[in-house]
Amino acid sequence: ITIPVCVQKIGIKETAAVNAFNLYPNPTNGNFTVTFDVPAKEDVAITVTDITGRVVYGEALKAYTGKYTKDYDFNHLDRGIYMFSIRTANGVVTKRVILN
């Protein structure tokens, strides 16, 4: 017996929260630059947390679109590992930053 089978792919179009997310230099002495691009106008939330999950920095960009570049000075923070997150309605991207 032969049974014909028809297979169709079903997918979900994924949209990145942001494009071209860069954080440098990393590891850092406390001063670093963050760049990313927001392809469509939307609210952006930037948070930095320590390894315990405590928020050490937060910033909100309302109805933002385009390229983002900012120099950060985190010399006041203890040396260690931090998580730099960018959240939009489309998701969240996170990079680890090491303060030496």
Image: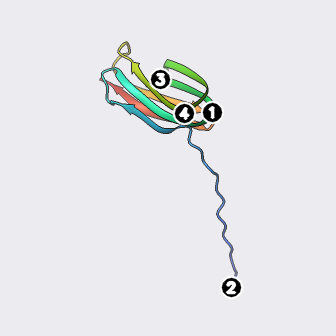
Q: In which quarter of the image is the N terminus?
A: bottom right
**Mark on residue 4?**
none
Question: Mark 2 or mark 4: which is in front?
Answer: 4
Residue underneath mark 4: 66
**Labels 3 & 4 near each other (Cβ < 8 A):** no
Foreground residue, 43 or 51? 43
| Residue found at the very far top of the displayed protein | 76
Q: What residue type is labelled 2?
A: Thr
Question: Mark 3 or mark 2: which is in front?
Answer: 3
Gap between marks 1 and 3 measured at Cα = 25 Å
Question: Mark 1 or mark 3: which is in front?
Answer: 1
Residue underneath mark 1: 41
Residue drawn at (53%, 37%) of the image: 18
Task: Answer with mark 2 or mark 4, whichever residue precedes in sequence.
Answer: 2
Q: What residue type is labelled 1?
A: Lys
Task: Answer with mark 3 or mark 4, whichever residue precedes in sequence.
Answer: 3
Q: In which quarter of the image is residue 43?
A: top right
Q: What residue type is labelled 3?
A: Thr
Question: Mark 3 or mark 4: which is in front?
Answer: 4
Q: What element carries label 4?
A: strand
**Mark on residue 2?**
2
Q: Where is residue 97 in the image (x, y as percent from the top left)?
A: 38, 29
**Labels 1 & 2 near each other (Cβ < 8 A):** no
Q: Where is residue 15 in the image (x, y as percent from the top left)?
A: 59, 44
Gap between marks 1 and 4 measured at Cα = 8 Å
| Mark 1 neighbour class, 10 Å CA radius: few under 14, some 14 to 19, many 20 or more | few
Gap between marks 1 and 2 measured at Cα = 53 Å
Gap between marks 3 and 2 measured at Cα = 58 Å
Residue 80 visible, this orientation? no
Residue underneath mark 3: 49
Q: Which amino acid does label 4 sit on?
A: Gly
Task: Answer with mark 1 or mark 3, whichever residue precedes in sequence.
Answer: 1
